[in-house]
Image (cartoon, coloured by chain):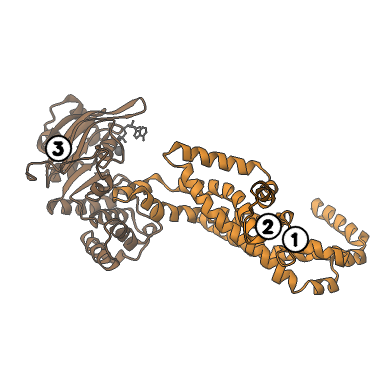
Chain colours: A brown, B orange
Amino acid sequence: MTAVTPVISIHGLHKYFGELEVLRGVDIDVRSGEVVCVIGPSGSGKSTLLRCVNLLEMPTAGTVVIEGIDMTDPETDVDAVRTRIGMVFQQFNLFPHLDVMGNLTIAQQKVLDRGQDEANEVATRMLERVGLEDKADEYPSRLSGGQQQRVAIARSLCMDPDMMLFDEPTSALDPELIGEVLDVMRGLAGDGMTMLVVTHEMGFAQHVADRVVFMDEGLIVEDGPPSQVLLNPRHERTQRFLRAVEHD
Amino acid sequence: MFLYVFTGLIVLAIVLGADWPKIRNSFFQWEVIRDMLPEVLTIGAKNTLLYTALAFAFGLVLALALALMRRSDFAPYRLFSLVYIELFRAIPALVTIILVGLGLPLAFGWSIPFGTAGKGMIGLGVVAAAYMAETIRAGIEAVPRGQMEAARSLGMSRGRAMTYIILPQAFRIIIPPLTNELVLLIKDTSLLFVIGTTPLSKELTKFARDFMTTSRNATPLTVAAIVYVIITLPMTYVVRRLEKRAGAGR
Ligand SMILES: Nc1ncnc2c1ncn2[C@@H]1O[C@H](COP(=O)(O)OP(=O)(O)O)[C@@H](O)[C@H]1O
Ligand SMILES: [Mg+2]
């Protein structure tokens, strides 16, 4: 049963901000272990889609089902489901008043009720995974953007999530720091993590994604393997977007 | 250059023209200063600090509750907080103090226990809370939205995210304005004389004022002023340092 139930299953998703309809009926399934990259022009609703998955935004209509649990059902314990959904933001959003170890342990202790020792042990393991075990005692402000984003990924991993959402994780980084973050993400994908990634990194989408979704004006225009969506797009709108990106 | 000469001439005129012996006699009588010690410190300054600390602690807790209510999803909380803040900022602190210290006993035949300390804590704290609530709210709003979102996405409830992520950052931001409120509060304890004091519960101003009836000159005021400066100067200095550091950090 679990093998066929998608980890993330979104149907008929609509989202309004006041009068503005930002998502206009989105359907998307992500299966276990799948890496799905979402591309599309700025303002097309990619971030909003991601934020509806863990209910940072409340969908106006439609269903968001995470591992069989309906997130929009008022009975659902949203906080509990969120621990299974890691989220990585464009602006990192590390907690500046805590050192790296504090960033990685606070939710383990306050949400998962892990003791200090266990939390530290998990945090150390995850820091090794992102290659920053020597930064445990630093404060975020003393780290480079790339290091901060890797800490943010490690912070999410400490909660043992079943899936990870990435919202343009490299867009705020200097070009020379993008690679180290993409490497960590590639490693995660290789370990079988289920990932929904909003990105402008076409190389990453082409080589790592199982599927690429092109969004425009609140709708999914094209959804298929990278070889199709990126190399032989069917829709004129997708072709235009890819041409514009190439000329960057 | 002209300004220096001009100012110098005025200062010179004052120095030459002033009746120094008379000034010294009214404001700096050593015997009076000697007579005031040590009670001006062990009673006056001690009570000023005690009332300030009590009112600040009570006011801070109340202010935090008001600030959180002000941002609540529950409209009646928001309304209550708004009305409270606007009301107690509009009324003179003196009126609130009289209300708490004298109005309540008259109305209900019940008064707040622990004398001036108890009444002062509530009376001043109720007023201070109205100001500090706005300060705390501004601090909470100065924490970037992404902090709450990151905390929530890790599974923290709103309350936990507030407690462990937002408020620690908010309080760091508002230490300077909160210290300013504390300095204002120190001075506002001088209003507590209106609710009546016993010889042992006088704060600095009341102590000095009553001493003037025996000293028959203004020296007690000088002493009180000096003690106020000694208490508040380190605080304003620390605030200035903190503000400089915060400014440099940006
Ligand atoms: N909280 C919000 N309130 C109002 N409008 C919003 C809000 N968040 C996003 N929007 C609007 O929704 C549209 C889609 O935004 P977003 O999902 O961030 O797009 P993308 O991530 O693809 O750039 C934009 O027009 C944006 O201005
Ligand atoms: Mg976006």
Residue assigned mark 2: B189
Horizontal side of residue A94 vs B230, given as left or right:
left
Output the chain of dot 1: B
Q: Secondary structure at mark 3?
A: strand
Secondary structure under the numbered disc 1 in the rendered image: helix
Identity of the amino acid at label 2? Thr
- Look at label 3 and name its amino acid: Asp
Residue under label 1: B205
Q: Name the mark on residue A29.
A: 3
First in sequence: mark 1 vs mark 2 = 2
Residue B18 spot, x, y in % from top left = 91, 60
- Report helix, strand or loop for mark 2: helix
Residue at point 40%, 51% (across, down): B162
Residue B89 drawn at (x, y percent): 62, 43
Distance, label 1 to label 2, CA atoms, is 9 Å
Using the rendered view, name the quadrant where residue B212 is placed.
Answer: bottom right
Q: Answer few, some or many: residues within 10 Å of disc 1's Cα (few below 14, many 20 plus, some between 14 and 19).
A: many
